[in-house]
Amino acid sequence: MARTVKRWLVLLAAVSLLLANAVPAAASSAPYESYNYNSWREAVPSPDAYLPKRTISGSELGIGEFKDPSDVNVSSSGQIYILDSGNSRIVILDEEYKLLRVMDGFTREGSKETFNAPGGLFVDEEERIYVADTGNSRVVILDAKGQLNRIINAPESDVLATDFQFQPLKLTVDHVGRVYVVAQGVYEGIMQFDETGKFIGYVGTNKVERDYGEYIWRMFSTKAQRAQMVLFVPTEFSSADIDHKGFVYATNIDPGSSEPIKRLNPSGEDVLKRFGYFDVKGDIRFRNNTGPSKLIDVKVLGNGMYSVLDATQNRVFTYDDEGHLLYIYGGKGNQVGTLKTPVAIEQSGDHQLVLDRGKNNLVVYEPTRFGTHVNEAVALHYQGEDTEAVHIWQEVLKLNANYDIAYIGIGKSLLMEKKNKEALGYFELGMDRKSYSVAFKRYRREMMKEHFGTFLTAGIALIFILILARVAVKWRRRRQIDREAGLH
């Protein structure tokens, strides 16, 4: 029954995809192939979740070409900040991507100072601008008007080496003003500074991925041989972002890491949920023999969703709060919407922005019907409004009848409504064995409870019949023995 329904939905999806082309957001064909992974870890075609809308370059803004841009951030007011590192300036746009102003430095004690190869920036709720001024070994904090607030210089601490070089690359800030800095050559974790700029320690540490063959060989090697071997050291973080609860999302640069994405609580423990079919690490199968994903940036989207940027295939992977891969978009190329050397990802309203250092521009992507519906349904599920999410999941299935997460979402809604039998079919279609087991146990308990009286009556009647049968057998045997005794 469930498989028959799925076949009809596949046919309906094909018709719906043709109709979807009439929608402006999906009218132009994508310059890349969109796909997702099923429960068998197979890459299967998928409707486009995001399509390129436009690109923004320095020449288009009338300020000269960007040069090696390194980061982009959107403030709570909607202003877009582009860190044009090669030109040592910050370009600020409004929500309509029109130029507001250019910030090429700041005044300190009466003299003009500039940035030197800055690597990252962040804008907090009060429009304070935090700049990782890499070449000058400092973090510069400016107010909304570009006036100097304070500077965080190289920290001094007993836990730091005497020859430590402070080279901040990326940063993020929580709601109380704590600054989290990803620094070059730091393997102990993300550097944490309090609201006054004092270094207070590290947050999170990447696990060492040991090569046990080399480890055993090391045990039997000479001192000279061991000196030439690769050291087992943790990898560096590549980027960080923070959610409204103060949890830090971080990516590391090791493409072979088992945990390339982390969600760190205040204690530095990784609490990222990984309940999907496969690990949260970008591509599951290496496409075109290019190797595993190298995740270089992460953006928290809200409602439990987050996107990561892959520098291997130049793609964006988006996950929900439980670790399910929602959709993938982007790719390599020279067309509008494809990327050459992506370095940062950001969100502006319902648009997603990817900064491309290779092309020196900012690419603006807008959601299609499919992407919009998925985002809405996931948000409702995260907020506990599963019943309201059902009709949106049904719209998703019209566009992609093979979208397992939609079946799972509908199944969870039915489970909350105690429609356990109906939920079983949807969990089977979504290949969610764990949820199917829960629904089956509840359905079995429901059946037992509903028919308990019948089962009890039948059981008592069966016991009574067995007793009568046993008495009858004994009585018959006794009569037979008495009859045989009378003959003798």
Image (cartoon, rainbow, N blue to C red):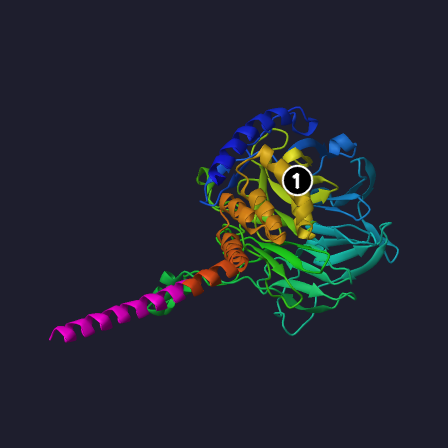
Of 245 and 348, which appears nearest the observer?
Answer: 245
Relative placement, left or right, of 91 versus 180 is right
Q: Quadrant of the C terminus?
A: bottom left
Residue 273 is drawn in which quadrant?
Answer: bottom right
The region drawn magenta spans: 462-488
Check disc 1: other Cα within 10 Å, few if <14, some if 14-19, many if 20+.
Answer: some
Secondary structure beneath dot 1 equals helix
Identify which amino acid the numbered label 1 is placed on. Answer: His
Relative placement, left or right, of 429 versus 352 is left
Residue 472 showing in the rendered view? yes
From this viewpoint, which residue is outermost toward the left?
488
Residue 345 showing in the rendered view? no
Count of picture labels = 1
Relative placement, left or right, of 332 versus 124 is left
Which residue is at 62% across, 56% downward? 250
Q: Position of residue 394 (x, y in %)?
A: 62, 38
Dominant secondary structure of the residues highlighted in magenta in the image: helix
Does residue 4 belong to the magenta stretch? no
Relative placement, left or right, of 469 versus 394 is left
Q: Position of residue 465 (x, y in %)?
A: 37, 64
Q: Position of residue 268 (x, y in %)?
A: 62, 66
The residue singled out by tag 1 in the image is 391
